[in-house]
Image (tube, helix red, strand yellow):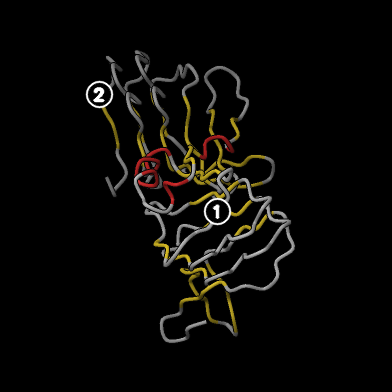
Amino acid sequence: LYPYSQKATLVANSYSDTKIDIPSNVAYEGVSYTVDKIADNCFYGCNNLTEVVLPETIISIGDNCFASCNALTTVLSLASTPPVCTGNLALESSTKIYVANEDIETYQNDSNWGQNKVESYDKFAVETIADRGEFKYRLYPFIKKATLLGNSYSNSSIEVPETTVYDGKTYQVTGIGKYCFYTNSNLTEIILPNTITTIEDWAIAECSNLVKLTLPENV
């Protein structure tokens, strides 16, 4: 821990879990520290490890961090910018990297991360079941976020909620999916909450009767 900067580095500790979800913050003596680095050899020789989730706060990963992790198949990174590697990640050739759709090319072009196959973490998402016209979502359990999907919405006015609850867990609605409202002639008004950060291609295209669109304050 670094008290002056309130930053933390994850260090080696003979981890035996098969899955490790690294937190973005850790509390110590009443102070919250942002976990932004992973030390050299952190997971070296962790033969039980099959999956690691890196939080969006990680900016740096040490040399040989994943060396001799023979069972590691999945590294899921929530960081939009590939964390800088101070040496060699030492991932097995069979290990796959999963990131957001919009970050795939950036990871592929990175000299370290690009040595492994990079795919979308949509693979781990869950789509809710909804009757025709009801809100339908793609949920991302590991980050508690949701994307609204198309579902033949028939109301003339739609106000997208900031959150949705599924299986007892609350998800923040941060995205509008591709073709979500495409060619919906019933719509005259769409209100998007301030939680929305991404609007995918053709989400509101060809809504011929749409006269009012309320966008998030940050857009």
Count the marks: how many?
2
For label 1, the crowd category at 10 Å Cα-Cα, with few meaning under 14, some 14 to 19 and many 20 or more, is many
15 up-or-down from 185: above or below: below
Residue found at x 54% / y 28%: 136
204 up-or-down from 194: above or below: above
Q: Could you tell me residue 129's position as x and y percent?
A: 63, 25
Q: Nearer the viewer, residue 125 or 121?
A: 121
Mark 2 belongs to which amino acid?
Val
Which residue is disc 2 drawn over?
Answer: 211
Residue found at x 51% / y 45%: 97
Q: Nearer the viewer, residue 40 or 183?
A: 40
215 up-or-down from 69: above or below: above
Instruction: Decide if residue 53 is on the left or right side of residue 201.
Output: right
Q: Could you tell me residue 3's position as x and y percent?
A: 47, 86
Question: Secondary structure under badge 2?
Answer: loop
Residue found at x 50% / y 20%: 151
For label 2, the crowd category at 10 Å Cα-Cα, with few meaning under 14, some 14 to 19 and many 20 or more, is few
Q: Nearer the viewer, residue 98 or 180?
A: 98
Question: Secondary structure under badge 1?
Answer: loop
Which one is closest to the eye, mark 2 or mark 1? 1
Instruction: Decide if residue 71 is on the left or right side of residue 125.
Output: right
Mark 1 belongs to which amino acid?
Leu
Q: Nearer the viewer, residue 53 or 217?
A: 53
- Which mark identifies residue 91? 1
